[in-house]
């Protein structure tokens, strides 16, 4: 029996490009129909961050145990901390026919690409490298050392842009959200056409 699964949407891109900002804006829109997958991390909470809302904050031992138990869809070590996506939540939500939205860095996104080839992979790009540096500095959540390593990393991350289905420029947050919503809507229409064709073929047997 054919069962419709939800769509896995992956938003990635360099640190400081605005992934978190765009994701938060998308999830304040009343007609957003995706479920956000809350990640696990060993990073310490920033001021105002809440366990179970922004991240599930874990110790390194706890994270490594989850990894050994196969509980993560993907993970990456990013500037000294682990980040990972809970596998069961993603699978159960997709199985229930609902779309799941991941906001993750590029190494993890490549792992998801290998495991979920029919996902929708969107790369959020900055208008320029200098604008990216300004945003990282402007956010002011890290010290100079961490900012420098994130900028160095961002240059490498930009090279992975061509591995994505779509590149969305984050010039204005509302524009980026509109573009992402339009891409998701178009992908749903494409899938419906393919599904219809498939079901028509089955009927003809
Ligand atoms: N691979 C992977 N990356 C994640 C996950 N959750 C968050 N990230 C990414 O980890 C990086 C660092 O996140 P964070 O410390 O919150 O800093 P910020 O996103 O730059 O504010 C960002 O690029 C996030 O998108 C995850 O579950 N897996
Ligand atoms: N379109 C935009 N224009 C100007 N500043 C932005 C834009 N999007 C995000 N920012 C700012 O850039 C900084 C980094 O954004 P953030 O969402 O934390 O990035 P990421 O999650 O990709 O690391 C923040 O200070 C944020 O307010």
Image (spheres, rainbow, N blue to C red):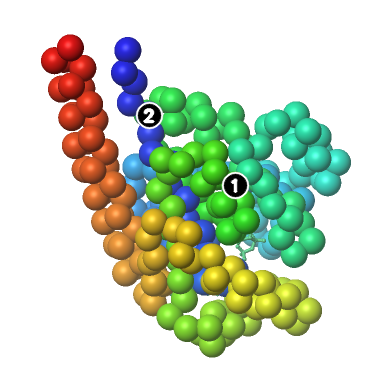
* Quadrant (top left/top right/bottom left/bottom right) for the C terminus: top left
Locate residue 159 relative to residue 67 in the image: left or right. Answer: left
Q: Quadrant of residue 58?
A: top right
Q: Are marks 1 and 2 in contact (CB under 8 Å)?
A: no
Residue sitting at x 44%, y 53%: 121
Q: Quadrant of residue 123?
A: bottom left
Which sits in the foreground, 56 or 128? 128
Locate residue 32 relative to residue 66 in the image: left or right. Answer: left
Image location (x, y in percent) of residue 167: 39, 65
Image location (x, y in percent) of residue 54: 60, 51
Q: Secondary structure at mark 2?
A: loop
- The residue that label 1 is drawn on is 111
- The residue that label 2 is drawn on is 5
Q: Is residue 198 visible?
A: yes
Residue sitting at x 64%, y 59%: 48
Locate residue 104 relative to residue 101 in the image: left or right. Answer: right
Which sits in the foreground, 196 or 168? 196
The relative height of residue 195 versus residue 123 in the rendered view (above or below) is above
Residue sitting at x 30%, y 55%: 183
Q: Is mark 1 within 8 Å of ligand 1?
A: yes
Which residue lies most toward the right here?
61
Image location (x, y in percent) of residue 71: 68, 32
| Label 2 neighbour load within 10 Å: few <14, some 14-19, many 20+ | some
């Amino acid at each position: 029996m054919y069962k419709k699964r939800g769509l896995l949407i992956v938003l990635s891109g360099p640190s400081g490009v605005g992934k978190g900002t765009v994701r938060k804006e998308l999830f304040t829109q009343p007609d957003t129909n995706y479920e956000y997958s809350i990640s696990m991390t060993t990073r310490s909470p920033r001021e105002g961050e809440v366990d179970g809302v922004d991240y599930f904050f874990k110790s390194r031992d706890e994270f490594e145990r989850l990894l050994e138990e196969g509980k993560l869809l993907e993970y990456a070590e990013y500037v000294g901390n682990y980040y990972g996506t809970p596998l069961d939540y993603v699978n159960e939500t997709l199985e229930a026919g609902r779309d799941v939205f991941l906001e993750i860095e590029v190494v993890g996104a490549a792992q998801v690409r290998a495991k979920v080839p029919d996902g929708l992979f969107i790369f959020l790009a900055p208008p320029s490298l200098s604008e990216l540096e300004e945003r990282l500095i402007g956010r002011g959540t890290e010290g100079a050392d961490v900012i420098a390593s994130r900028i160095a990393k961002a240059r490498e991350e930009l090279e992975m842009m061509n591995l994505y289905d779509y590149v969305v420029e984050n010039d204005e947050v509302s524009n980026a959200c509109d573009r992402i919503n339009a891409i998701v809507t178009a992908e749903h229409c494409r899938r419906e056409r393919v599904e219809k064709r498939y079901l028509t073929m089955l009927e003809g047997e």
